[in-house]
Image (spheres, rainbow, N blue to C red):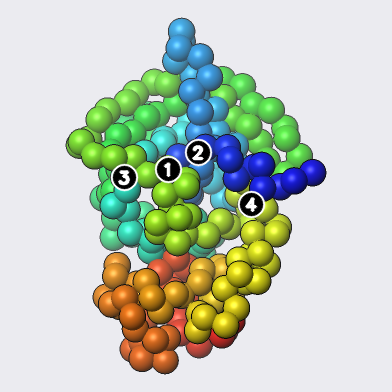
Amino acid sequence: MDVKVLYNISYGMYIVSSNKADAFNAQVANTVFQITNDPVTIAVSINKLNFTHEFMKSSLQFGVSILSEETPLNFIGNFGFKSGRDISKFKDINFKILNSGCPVVLDNAISYLEAKVINSLDCGTHTLFLGKVSDSAVLRPGKVMTYEYYHQIKQGVTPKTAPTFIKEEISTTIKSEVKMGKYKCSVCGYIYDPQKGDPDGGIAPGTPFEKIPDNWVCPVCGADKTQFIPL
Ligand code: FE
């Protein structure tokens, strides 16, 4: 099998949210698809280990916030590389609680949907949830972030729990980036490229890793500078 073929499949970037009674959780997902239009149903694949999976199983409802291209990496990292078991992901962000009690994230979202789970399929490591859309709203104009844009332009990385994580992704990246003064985050795999810097984090393009202030953190997962290893 040539795993590179899998990179040719297109996806978007979404925050999938749910509730368990009064508690909220949310995570990044790229596998959200419309399945039928009468009724309007969508499907999403969620790792069984994820806290959000537990919430969706409990409340049988979920929200989907569709992210804009301007979404900062650290916002995606907060939802994608951290667990709601360890931190409150809804602290310091704007969100809305729908009539059903389901939360939806508003920050960096162009629009949102809410869906009621009407079926699910056990897919081994993941559950494919099928939901009937019960609410939706457009929040503002803008371009939606595709999965490709996240990887190519934002230099984002994929968590191991994502349905589309490819084991060879990190090793292949390392092989091609050797000898270029780059540093890799040992927690999430993000690679700091001095030529690109980290403009969202206040690091100008052309800044060598050694010149980055000590209080700088990984734009994806929030790990500190000491967690980076030279390539
Ligand atoms: Fe990181």
The verdict on label 1 being within 8 Å of ligand 1 is no
Q: From mark 1 to mark 4, how far is it between C-alphas?
A: 16 Å
Q: Is residue 87 visible?
A: no
- Residue under label 4, please give it: 165
The residue that appears at 32% across and 48% down in the rendered structure is 69
Badges 4 and 2: C-beta atoms under 8 Å apart?
Answer: no
Q: Counting residues from the N terminus, which is met first, the one under dot 4 or under dot 2?
A: 2
Residue at the far right: name it.
Answer: 1
- Residue under label 2, please give it: 11
Q: From mark 1 to mark 3, how far is it between C-alphas?
A: 9 Å
Residue 227 in picture, x, y percent from top left: 53, 83
Q: Counting residues from the N terminus, which is met first, the one under dot 1 or under dot 3?
A: 3
- Residue under label 3, please give it: 68
> How many discs appear?
4
Check disc 2 and give the amino acid type: Tyr
Badges 1 and 4: C-beta atoms under 8 Å apart?
Answer: no
Q: From mark 3 to mark 2, how far is it between C-alphas?
A: 13 Å
